[in-house]
């Protein structure tokens, strides 16, 4: 990976870390009742964990080719879908707020997804030699 590629990854990982801290802080303090806070926090944490895995996997496959990157997109989508279903079932069974879980997960997921797409675009330009 080129120096520019490593710098791009660090930049996007830093953005993702900032989103994670902000989202976890909002989940911890924004909901009024404890159950909603816990549920939102779990949703955000699940989105953050899957986002970290997604960004690392995308970094690895960007060294190979675009076809491998598309496979990772499918794998990560499946991982997140399973995570949402398991997390939502757990929240409901534990008597927590399903709405807070969904809001926490998807509010964080959409921002992290944008960062991941931005990273893949930047990395693909670097692999193609588009910034020289």
Image (cartoon, rainbow, N blue to C red):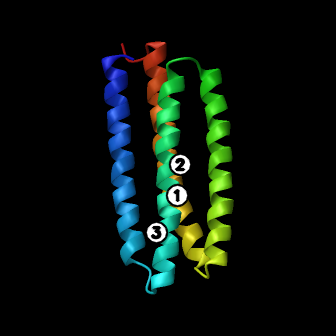
In the picture of the structure, the residue carrying the numbered disc 2 is: 50
Q: Quadrant of the C terminus?
A: top left
In the picture of the structure, the residue carrying the numbered disc 1 is: 46
**Going 59% across and 28% down the picture, which residue do you hit?**
69
**Going 42% across and 71% down the picture, which residue do you hit?**
27
Judged from the image, the secondary structure of the residue bearing numbered disc 1 is helix
In the picture of the structure, the residue carrying the numbered disc 3 is: 41
Crowd rating for badge 3 (residues with CA inside 10 Å; few <14, some 14–19, many 20+): many
Above or below 116: residue 28: below
Crowd rating for badge 2 (residues with CA inside 10 Å; few <14, some 14–19, many 20+): some
Q: Position of residue 77 (x, y in %)?
A: 65, 45
Query: Quadrant of residue 85 in the image?
Result: bottom right
Q: Is residue 76 visible?
A: yes
Above or below 107: residue 69: above
Disc 3 vs disc 2: Cβ atoms closer than 8 Å?
Answer: no
Above or below 38: residue 78: above
Alpha carbons under labels 2 and 1: distance apart = 6 Å
Judged from the image, the secondary structure of the residue bearing numbered disc 2 is helix
Earlier-in-chain disc, 3 versus 2 = 3
Q: Is residue 111 visible?
A: no
Above or below 92: residue 19: above
Disc 2 vs disc 1: Cβ atoms closer than 8 Å?
Answer: yes
């Amino acid at each position: 990976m080129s120096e520019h590629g490593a710098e791009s990854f660090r930049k996007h990982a830093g953005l993702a870390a900032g989103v994670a801290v902000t989202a976890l802080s909002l989940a911890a303090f924004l909901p009024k009742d404890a159950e909603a806070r816990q549920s939102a926090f779990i949703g955000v944490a699940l989105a953050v964990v899957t986002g970290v895995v997604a960004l690392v996997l995308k970094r690895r496959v960007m060294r190979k080719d675009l076809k491998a990157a598309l496979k990772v997109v499918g794998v990560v989508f499946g991982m997140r879908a399973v995570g949402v279903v398991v997390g939502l079932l757990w929240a409901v069974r534990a008597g927590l707020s399903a709405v807070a879980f969904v809001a926490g997960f998807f509010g964080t997921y959409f921002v992290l997804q944008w960062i991941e797409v931005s990273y893949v675009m930047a990395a693909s330009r670097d692999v193609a030699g588009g910034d020289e």
